[in-house]
Amino acid sequence: MTTAVHTPAFAEGIQYFGQLLPGFDTYGKTPVIAAGQMGITDANDPAAAFQTLLYADALRYLTLQVCASKASGHPGGFASQAEVYASLVMLGHKNILTEVGHHAPGFYSAMFLDRSLEAMGIDTVQQLRDKFREKDGLIGHLSGFIPGILAPAGPLGQGQHFAMSAAKLHRDILFPFTVGDGGLGEPYIISAMQHFHTAFPTVTNFLPVLVWNGYSQEHHSMVSTKTNQEMLSYWQGNGFDEVILVNAKDFDDKNQTGEYVDGTLFSIEQRLAFTQAILAGVDKAAKSALSGKLTVFIIKQLKGAGVHATGSKSHNLYAHHTLDNADIISGLKTRALHLQAWELVRTNCERAGGGSSSQVAVTESVFPVPTLGTLPLEEYAAGEAKVSTTAMGRLVGYVGQQDKNFIVSNADGNEASGIANINQALKIIHPTTDDLYFQSPDGQVYEPLSEDACAGLAAGLALMGARTLWCSYESFAINGLPIWQTVTQAMAELRRPTPSTITLYTAGALEQGRNGWTHQRPEIEAYFASMMRNGNVFPVFPPDANSIQVCYDWALTTQNKGVVITASKSPLPIRTTFAQTRQGLEDGAVVLQDIPGDKQVVFAVIGDMTLAPAFEAAAFLKTQGIGSKIVSIINPRRLYRPSDVAWATCSQPDGGFLSDAKFAEIFGGSALIGLTGGAPAMLEPVMLRSTSPRDTFAWKRGETTATAGQLMAFNGITAEALCKRGLELVG
């Protein structure tokens, strides 16, 4: 090994430089991607394969070095598919996603090489090392905060949602996404793609790339036991028209043992042959996916190929894996490139795809959405019995008619949630046209029986810039929450505005009594209660059909937020005006009834059905000479103090919080009772600020079969119990 004396600025921090690979004078004299070109012109060109190999090694080198700089991170998984990533870029495809968060250092290395990270002030390898796994730098897993990165990588089984969403909005662009052995064990990946393909059969410009390396994080993967034919049959049996597998073992000239081998150990001739096969295979896969075929590309290569270790031992670096560690030094020196090779790779990366990912990735610009104009809100008279969800459904239909990219998703059926009018207006997406069921191939209502698929498509489309609505029964929405949570956190970090991801949860626990305790699960409200402190999550509880219309109208005006509307599908009395809800959205709550008295019990109520026992209790307290106030909490996040919420660091900050004086005006009294049919955590903002004697009434658990009233009684939420406790609190 030799050390370069004179290096360009970007190479500062490269620990080791190597010799030129044999053939460089023939295949590396000039960049294979010429100035003004988007990518290589011939996937079978030996020079293209040679320079792709150099790029793959550069990715491996940087991945290992940046991880070792912090003795932390995950180099092994990305290393086993470096040739594929390099091939995609060299072919001009830069809108690459992953569901594997552990591929982050590889993606960061790619963003460095094409100069995307210069937007973060990362111009040199040394700065890349310094910023890796640091706050406000290159965090441990992918984030939309980082230039050129299309989507976050959260829990496994999510990447396909982002790729499919992007593909639907940008039909002429390829969106590959990497999947690992471990990820393939998630049930959502294949089923989500099947659901999506059934609904949108012409949208095939997303490309799963299976990194089949034989290992998960700490052991042999379950799919490591499959034969090549079994793996091919698996994908074919799940509807994939084109399955392309490139197996490193077919090129091994070093007699490595086992079914999974390290392609970086081959002779240079076989390394080039292997890379050529991958380049040609990726080119074929890309063209297939863009031409209307459901396609998957599979690379079979040992995990950790070309870094410090192989198998699961390559997955993670530990405290001893510093730049002084013998294994790290050996891995770096083996992968070290000559300075000329570094400059060649960098030039190709800059030119590929028309420029840096920070300039050409679809998420680097705002997706255009049509203006909606004034929504046709209809204000009902006080006392009328109206279904809130139906009132909102009429507006949803209007939104979809104005915005043809708008998608509504619901695994539990819109008709069962009181929003059949959405189906009537927008039609359910289905290959079979059936007017009885409002089905049409060009519909806008996505209804597979999968919460993950529904939440994934809706949240993914919102992240990519489109309007959506995810609907669910509150009891089952937890199954779709992981990706929604990932997206809302990502939205808090995005460098661009995007429509908020909006959800409608219906059929709350109180409405599902007759179905038994399996359907009586409002625990998800506790998740949203804790997420309110994130800064961009807004659970909203409209008390009636007037209120829900204003809440939805408001939600559509927000950006980079997660808005969760929870409402009943039962006819309930109108208690608010539009003006009251608009004020309630700003203040957090609205006073529905105020009965004065020397002593006054304040009922702070979350939900619509739970208002009924509060009004009954207020009427009884009046007979006892005790005043009362009924406050409907519509937007509880507003009731926190500014210091309670991480709002200032959000990309679209919202610092609207109720003042102390206004809080005292609304919630001040002799005693306060917080009341909710869901998780008591949602009452935290009120309980935190109130200085009155106070208590909470909330959900405890479900019952076998009961009415809404019986369920409330089972959980101690009755007018009698509220009166008794109110009298105790006021003395």
Image: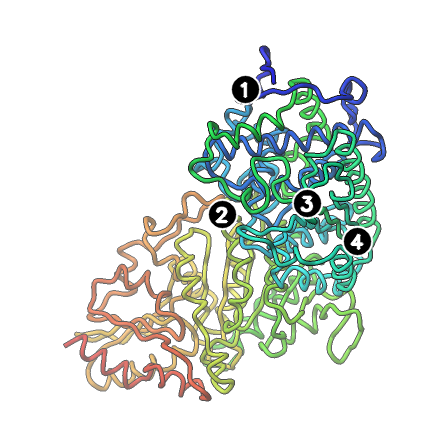
Helix, strand or loop under label 4: strand
Q: Secondary structure at mark 1?
A: loop
Label 4 crowd bin: few (<14), some (14–19), many (20+), radius 10 Å: some
Q: Position of residue 617 (x, y in %)?
A: 30, 82
Q: Name which residue type carries label 3.
A: Thr
Residue that mark 1 sits on:
12
The numbered disc on residue 492 is 2
Q: Position of residue 160 (x, y in %)?
A: 66, 54
| N-terminal label among 4 and 2 | 4
The residue that disc 3 covers is 257
Pick the quarter of the image with the N terminus: top right
Picture coordinates of residue 73 (x, y %)? Answer: 50, 40
Examine the image and state in which quarter residue 417 appears: bottom right
Q: In the shown orientation, is residue 622 left or right of residue 183? A: left
Is residue 153 toward the left or the right of residue 166 in the image?
left
How has the structure been colored for display?
A: rainbow
